[in-house]
Image (cartoon, grey):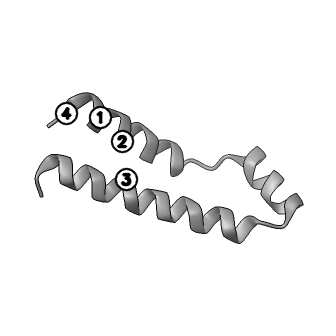
Amino acid sequence: MNRAELDAIELMLRDLNTRHEEIRHRAAFRGCTSELLALQQELVHYLMSKREGLCGR
């Protein structure tokens, strides 16, 4: 298991699950809020799968 990669994944998951009002405001202004949220969920699922692979699950 690569501890540094696992730590990076954990930090990115934490960041993706944090509300970033400035980015959400920009998405709303550009009309892409649903696409932003869908992409965020896709990234969360990808990182969770990668984390499980690193942990040997």
Identity, as a three-letter code, of the amino acid under mark 2: Ile
Give whichever of 52, 24 is nearer the camera: 52
Q: Are marks 2 and 3 in contact (CB under 8 Å)?
A: yes
Q: Amino acid at mark 4?
A: Asn
Which residue is disc 2 drawn over?
Answer: 9
Work out which residue is located at the far right of the displayed protein and give it.
29
Q: Indicate whether 11 appears above or below 53.
A: above
Query: Alpha carbon of mark 4 to alpha carbon of mark 2: how far?
Result: 11 Å
Please report contact status of discs 2 and 1: CB closer than 8 Å, yes or no.
yes
* Direction from residue 14 to residue 48 in the image, left or right: left
The tag earlier along the polypeptide, 1 or 3, is: 1
Residue 8 sits in quarter: top left
Residue type highlighted by circle 1: Glu
Circle 2 packing at 10 Å, graded few (<14), some (14-19), many (20+), is some
Is the N terminus in the top left, top right, bottom left or bottom right quadrant? top left
Disc 2 secondary structure class: helix
Identity of the residue drawn at 36% across and 41% down: 9
How far apart marks 2 and 1 lie (CA) works out to: 6 Å
User: What's the CA distance linking mark 1 and mark 4?
Assistant: 5 Å
Identify the element where label 3 is drawn: helix
* Kind of residue at badge 3: Leu
For the residues labelled 1 and 4, say whether their Cβ atoms are less than 8 Å apart.
Answer: yes
Disc 4: which residue: 2
